[in-house]
Amino acid sequence: MPPPPHPPSFSAADDPWIEVRTGHRYHRVGLRELLLDAHTFDDLAVPHPPAASGLLRIAVALTARVTALDDPDLNASQWNRLRRDDFAAGRFDADRVNAYFDSGQNCWDVFDPLRPWMQDPSLREECESTAGIDALVPGRPSGNNLAWFAPHAPHTQTPVPTRRALQHLLIHHFYGRFGTCTPRTPSSGTASKNLRGGPLRTSVSFHPLGRTLHETLLAGLPLFRGDEQPVPDRCPWEEPQPPDPLAAPHSITWPGRLLTGRSVHALLLLPGDDGTTVRDTYFTWATRHPNPEATDPYLAYHLDLSKEVAHRRTVRRADADRAWWRELDTLALAPDEEGPTRRPAIFDTLNDLPPPLRRTLRVRVIGFEQNTTKAIDHQWYTALTPPLLHWAHEHDPARAQRIADCCRAAELAAEQLAIHTNDAWRTATAPHGTAPSQTKKKPPAGKARKNCVWARQALHRYWPLAEQVFWRLLEDPGTSPHTAFAQAAVTALRQSTTHARARDRAAARALAEAVAGIVRRTADPAPRSI
């Protein structure tokens, strides 16, 4: 009699599923090798930026575990000294890495029947049906969505390689959608099918990037700023039991739960025959409780002191049309400076890095533009900055303030360009004898008016010009940024409306008034009320 077949298995620790790059060579590793050989890798090469963002948070949490930098009793000087020793060592200690991954307390098997990695095994009993493999893969149509860009449909669902399915799993945990899902009925609760958005939904992350992955992970480790942690800090794979969907969430402890344990989505991957593919998935909610307040160390925040305390702070949202240099004011200014934004908390620890690393450290920008209340994903993007810590307020206050002034002037010029161009459009297209204000209804309170075709074309030309002006202004501190960006806005408007001004006298007059308004309000902006 042949032996019974082995159950499908795939180890997130030891099976290859993470793409890495060394020079021009690419290959795949598991989490164990990712840490053991981090000093030999230049960078991650994960194809989907949101998956890379989630993976970096997981890898940083693992780094804290294997370096003992997760001890909340260390004061700041002790913690910085220990991290400097790890930088000097040049690699992670192999014995500590292997001891952590070989510990029986952690479960790495993706298809383990009791504790599958980053999944909830109780969905088999609590969900009435699976969601289909297409619900797991971004870009594939699922449910009632139409197949505009993919040949997939409910009757032709193609299995996904497990290595790729794990990356999709991370995207859902960190950037998961709003809306409805497969109903879930806990053993002592009622059925529900409503989803909340993931903890990073609509956000843009800023990750320090070193010369090797070893440096990247150590530089990306945030310092503990709290007073005490009332409960043990655990990552999802370190929990002794599967999560209880009805229990109140644990307080956000550092660094494990902060970086890896705030998901509000529950998933369970169903393997193919040999574990190399995923053929189906359960997809539903993980908790009905609001998540405790937490400050993600890689996100920038807006502050609006005019609002109530509970709604005063919001995450800076991702915008696929927004160039990375427009974020430099947030990254350069120290957090105690006046202003409506707060830079990511991870920047508060970068000034204690060894000088050779500090001079070469870049920043990886990862954004995912999504709808805030619907299951709509627009576009993800990534960018790498040049080394910029020497521009920070702690090292060059004058340069940091100049950066902030230029960024704000560029944004003001864009705002005035849109306002005056839209006004010119309404004036030029108003019926004869009708006031322009009578041709368009005012937008509802709190909702911005859509830009007209002139404004869209002008802004499309403006931002590349503004970037050239920005870098020129950093080398020329004597030039007024308001004047320079006003000129760029006027140039963009004239270039984008050449034909309209030549064909229509009314358009030419309206656009001339727009140019005058842009120069008046941008080159010499009115002081803002405090």
Image (spheres, rainbow, N blue to C red):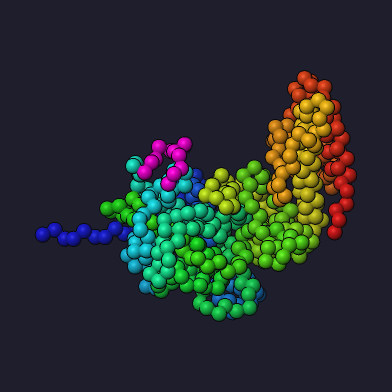
Residue 242: % across, % down: 40, 69
Q: Is residue 49 above or below residue 70?
A: above
Q: Is residue 528 above or below residue 233?
A: above
Query: Main SS type for the magenta part?
Result: loop
Nearest the viewer among 294 and 431 is: 431
The range drawn in magenta is 143-154
Nearest the viewer among 207 and 380 is: 380
Identify the residue at horizontal 49%, vertical 47% (top origin).
47
Residue 177: % across, % down: 51, 53
Q: Is residue 210 left or right of residue 4?
A: right
- Residue farthest along the top direction in this orientation: 503
**In this view of the protein, can residue 174 be seen by the observer?**
no
Q: How many marks?
A: 0
Residue 323: % across, % down: 67, 44
Q: Image quadrant for the N terminus? A: bottom left
Q: Is residue 95 left or right of residue 428?
A: left
Q: Is residue 464 above or below residue 138?
A: above
State which quadrant residue 434 falls in: top right
Asked if the magenta segment contains residue 335, the reply would be no
State which quadrant residue 217 falls in: bottom right
- Residue farthest along the left direction in this orientation: 1
State which quadrant residue 487 falls in: top right
Residue 426: % across, % down: 77, 33
Asked if the magenta segment contains residue 148, the reply would be yes
Identify the residue at horizontal 32%, vertical 55% (top origin).
271
Identify the residue at horizontal 83%, vertical 38% (top origin).
518
Identify the residue at horizontal 85%, vertical 59% (top origin).
530
**In this view of the protein, can residue 316 be seen by the observer?**
yes
